[in-house]
């Protein structure tokens, strides 16, 4: 069985805009009127849910997220949401956080600030971002911000160089932005016990 955090497909940010229809969640797509015989008793539309591995994947592939990687390996993987420099806690601590949040929730789902990757990283590390000037803990959100930053912050003088030089500078800025945004190296993070997180949900909204 898999404990994960989701908001129903098409409801990630709840803005009432077209974004709600083009961004999809990790929620099991099985209709509620035909529950899975293995996890139907635990299935819910959103929040922290428990589902079997088949419903969790729903035809997709299972990918391994790596913890405690070296900076060199981190930079060698240009796609965000695949690894972090942060170390994983022992399995019993991870399971305790996940089961506690299954019973008590993990706040409101937001595709940029509080998503399924944020949930997994917190369960594995116990780390939370404690500043409001943040897009969340997830590598995918950080990569998006890094890509935007690399584009908008490139000095105009680079526009006169070759395309190869411009691409190299942009990619370098993207890599540096990803690295400094990783939860394993950021200074605006703190280790927060899960009981305290649930008792003070504003910590997760920071």
Image (tube, rainbow, N blue to C red):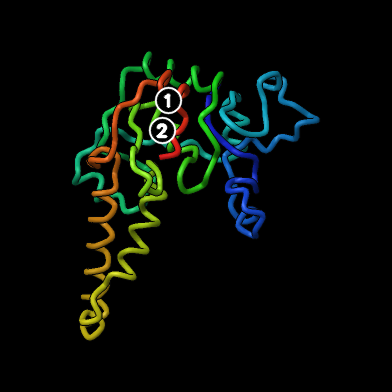
Q: Is residue 86 above or below residue 150?
A: above
Q: Residue at x 30, y 33 (%)?
A: 67
Kindly state the secondary structure of the residue where label 1 is placed.
helix
Of the 4 image quadrants, the one containing the C terminus is: top left
Residue 195, x across and y down, in percent:
43, 18
Residue 16, quarter of the rendered image? bottom right
Q: How many discs appear?
A: 2
Q: Is residue 65 above or below residue 37?
A: below
- Report which residue position mark 2 lands on: 203
Do residues under tags 1 and 2 come within 8 Å of each other at their CB atoms?
yes
Q: Residue at x 71, y 25 (%)?
A: 36
Q: Residue at x 29, y 48 (%)?
A: 181
Of labels 1 and 2, earlier in sequence is 1
Of the 4 image quadrants, the one containing the N terminus is: top right
- Report which residue position mark 1 lands on: 197
* Few, some or many residues within 10 Å of mark 1 (<14, 14–19, 20+): some
Q: Nearer the viewer, residue 192 or 87?
A: 192
Residue 113, quarter of the rendered image? top left
Of the numbered discs in the image, which one, if any, rests on residue 28? none
Q: Is residue 162 above or below residue 173?
A: below
Q: Nearer the viewer, residue 179 or 62?
A: 179
Residue 122, x across and y down, in percent:
39, 30
* Few, some or many residues within 10 Å of mark 2 (<14, 14–19, 20+): some
Furthest residue in direction right, as rendered: 33
Q: Is residue 62 left or right of residue 21?
A: left
Residue 96, x across and y down, in percent:
43, 15
Distance CA(mark 1)–CA(mark 2): 6 Å
């Amino acid at each position: 069985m898999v404990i994960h955090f989701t908001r129903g497909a098409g409801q990630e940010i709840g803005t009432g805009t077209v974004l709600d229809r083009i961004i999809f969640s990790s929620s099991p797509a099985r209709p509620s009127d035909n529950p899975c015989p293995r996890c139907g008793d635990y299935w819910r539309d959103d929040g922290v849910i428990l589902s079997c591995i088949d419903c969790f994947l729903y035809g997709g592939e299972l990918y391994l997220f790596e913890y405690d990687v070296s900076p060199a390996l981190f930079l060698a993987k240009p796609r965000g949401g695949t690894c972090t420099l942060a170390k994983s806690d022992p399995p019993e601590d991870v399971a305790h956080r996940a089961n506690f949040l299954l019973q008590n929730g993990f706040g409101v789902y937001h595709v940029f600030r509080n998503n399924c990757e944020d949930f997994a990283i917190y369960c594995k590390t116990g780390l939370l971002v404690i500043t409001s000037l943040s897009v969340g803990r997830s590598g995918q959100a950080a990569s998006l911000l890094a890509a935007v930053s690399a584009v908008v912050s490139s000095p105009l003088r680079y526009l006169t160089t070759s395309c190869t030089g411009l691409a190299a500078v942009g990619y370098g800025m993207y890599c540096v932005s990803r690295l400094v945004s990783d939860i394993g190296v950021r200074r605006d993070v703190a280790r927060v016990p899960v009981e305290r997180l649930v008792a003070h949900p504003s910590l997760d909204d920071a």
